[in-house]
Amino acid sequence: MSAANAEAYRRLVESDPVLVDIRPAFEVVPGMTEATVLTSGPPLDPAEYMGGQRRAILYGAVYEGLAADLDDAERKVAAGEIEISNCHSHGCVGSVAGIYTASMPVFVVENRAFGNRGFCNFYEGESRRRLNYGSYDEGVEAGLRFIERTLAPTLREAVLVDGGIELRPIIRRAITMGDELHSRNTAATTLLMKALAPRLLELGLAGRVGADAVRETLAFMGASDYFFLRLSMAAAKATADAAHGIEGSSIVTAMTLSCKSFAIRVSGLGDRWFDGPHPTLEGKLFDGFTEDDIEWIGGESHITETVGLGGFCQAAAFALQAYQGGSAQAMAALNEQMYEITTGEHPELKIPYFGYRGVPVGIDVERVLETGIVPVIDGGLAGRGGGQIGAGILRAPMECFEAAGAALAATRA
Amino acid sequence: MSAANAEAYRRLVESDPVLVDIRPAFEVVPGMTEATVLTSGPPLDPAEYMGGQRRAILYGAVYEGLAADLDDAERKVAAGEIEISNCHSHGCVGSVAGIYTASMPVFVVENRAFGNRGFCNFYEGESRRRLNYGSYDEGVEAGLRFIERTLAPTLREAVLVDGGIELRPIIRRAITMGDELHSRNTAATTLLMKALAPRLLELGLAGRVGADAVRETLAFMGASDYFFLRLSMAAAKATADAAHGIEGSSIVTAMTLSCKSFAIRVSGLGDRWFDGPHPTLEGKLFDGFTEDDIEWIGGESHITETVGLGGFCQAAAFALQAYQGGSAQAMAALNEQMYEITTGEHPELKIPYFGYRGVPVGIDVERVLETGIVPVIDGGLAGRGGGQIGAGILRAPMECFEAAGAALAATRA
């Protein structure tokens, strides 16, 4: 292993993400203005966002009050009055379309080992119609307002009570309870509730938070098995960013997806993104949908795979078969392959099925090219016209790694 | 399958255990008097209880105020002033030594499908020194008093709020989150907390339960990963009892362990118990202990295996390797063997690793005899002098099944 990759690996596994605050994006996200809409994917020209991802961006502008309707939003984007930017450039990661507007609350996750921060906004709930899946209507808006006005302020009080919440112990434990922290977060969400319930109770008893707010917060989290995903993502972002920018390192520090492409970023290659086509897919679709209904509208939740979670620890989460298809044996085999393309194993995050072997961490572009094995990703699938229509196992395109490999060779030359 | 076994199987899988109340044993356990001490195992003469199990019984008498000390307790047992009886004869199941006294609170679990009830007392907490493991000192006593005076009354209020708590949905879900509901109850305990937290909040806000009691209750449950075991046991007891007493059925409806023997009860063979020697064992001992330190002081938590949990769904709980040794592959292989000796698969409780195959339910004496395969049991190990000293996988002795098989043949003849 090169010294550069050893250092990137060290930073990945020594990262210590802690939820320290919950704040409106405008107040904490670097470079966020009142007129900014963030979305998933590598940086694109505003005109390049198409289809469902474009609609999601415009819906975000309407939600934020930046535009009266989609046409108005289009005009303001063209006039430069609404600024579209990509999440990763602002320390954020997007789930599916990944829409952030100024007033949306974000989890503030601090990497205590290295001092950097990652952000992610909130899970919208169990409905298949959600803004992050490109849907928007009165129900979607009401859900987002509840998050903004009730859920986030209440949880913020609970988070601040005791100086934040360490996320690594929850993630470590959830892996022994059937989560892989990307497409399955049931245990982590429940463990988070276990940590928050006594704090919420104290706040309610002391009258510092209204009883209804506490009630509604517990009810929302109790009904949202994916709630923790956004914390897993923010933690992964804070972790991956700490390993970015090491000269000579061929470790992947982000993978992203837009309506146009799949792209990766590499520790030793600065802010460049290396593009490829959309992933190949083995999916399980909800009843009534076919593969023709799938639309790529963006996605960055595979920041989790970048740090050894998701597809890289799916042998911890056999329950996922019911959601995304496949078999336990296939899941274990895919997971094992990931050890072929990574730099090391995590000393703390361990998979019981593999005899408590550490999750594979640090995707190495060189090893992907040598082995011909690309990263596997657990992911949700968006449908044309909006909404979630299924889930599946995605395979990153080799083209990204070939492009990054060429750039690494050029750097060395 | 015989009609009798089909009926026993139907009752096992249609059982619907609901936690309906928490009460002092004296108030609800059939046949319990103020001077009764219950313990694990088939019925024995008082003089037959030996070693650690005898000490645990006498400690129970001291805890209850029936005797001043162990010598006084011995005298009162001899004089018939303290009555020793076995848990199963009173609708109860004992964890390890299984000591119940009159004032100890018990979970009251009603089988809503068949109308019968099962009882189990409380988990004492994470200390290795616990009365159920034959230990007694000021700390053990203080823990039991906390359960009696604070924890149980507080939880009772929460249980009664909304007409009880259905246990099957929690068990079903916990199996997809790494529990087998005998030696691992981490997920089920957390899911129970998730169900109870909003109720405790309401009680606290309404002033119906003191804030300190709510606080201490959440703190105890939050620190007790095994808390749910006693509910799993009471649910299993209520389930197994519903399948008992079917003429001609060769299905096992209880397995128990005393200082003297391992014994089983069979649906079609009335109240007789069929004895064998103590189980064979593959254990993992806590640091500093050897197999010579193990003492058999009783145990009935394998009521869980009797209904398809524990060793019968250990392929759902690979995390147990860290606690009881073995490998994931060995656990899966043992679990698969259990399909050879059972009557059917549970239509609702399913193991993700086996492609969501139902847990094997209904141990059939005839199939044990035909295949030579005996039930596997996940269990904790008690040490000489008291306390838990490890855990492991136990194998029931074939002799019980041979004796029961002979009795079945005699019945038919």
Image (cartoon, coloured by chain):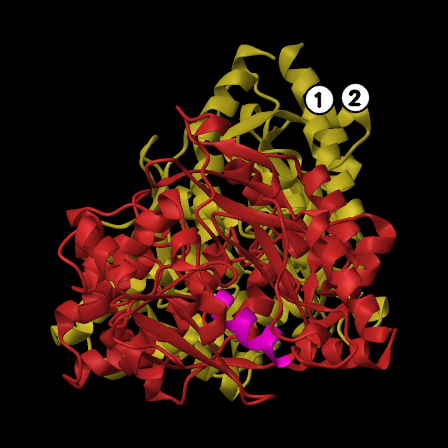
Chain colours: A yellow, B red
Q: Secondary structure at mark 2?
A: helix
x then y, percent, for residue A126: 55, 74
Q: Which quadrant of the structure image shows residue B310?
A: bottom right
In this view, which residue lies farthest toward the front?
Answer: B79
x then y, percent, for residue A392: 74, 58
How many neighbours does mark 1 have within 10 angstroms: few (below 14), some (14-19), or many (20 or more)? Answer: some
Task: Name which residue lies at 33% across and 42% down.
Answer: B128
x then y, percent, for residue B172: 60, 68
x then y, percent, for residue A291: 84, 66
Q: Compare residues B306 and B229 and report the one nearer the observer.
A: B306
In the rendered image, residue B8 lying in the magenta stretch gets the answer no
Range shown magenta? B232-242
In the rendered image, residue B236 lying in the magenta stretch gets the answer yes
Say whether marks 2 and 1 touch (CB < 8 Å): yes
Q: Whole-Å distance between the Cαs marked 2 and 1? A: 6 Å
Task: Name which residue lies at 75% across and 33% down.
Answer: A337
Magenta region, mostly helix, strand or loop? helix
User: Mark 1 belongs to which subunit?
Assistant: A
Which residue is identified by label 1? A366
Which residue is identified by label 2? A370
Q: Are marks 2 and 1 on the same chain?
A: yes
Image quadrant containing the N terminus of chain B:
bottom right
In the picture, measured across the screen, residue B60 lies left or right of residue A194, that is left
In the picture, measured across the screen, residue B39 lies left or right of residue B43, that is left
Please say whether residue B69 is visible from this viewpoint. Answer: yes
In the picture, measured across the screen, residue B250 lies left or right of residue B131, that is right
Task: Name which residue lies at 49% across and 69% down.
Answer: B88
**Rendered image: mark on residue A243:** none
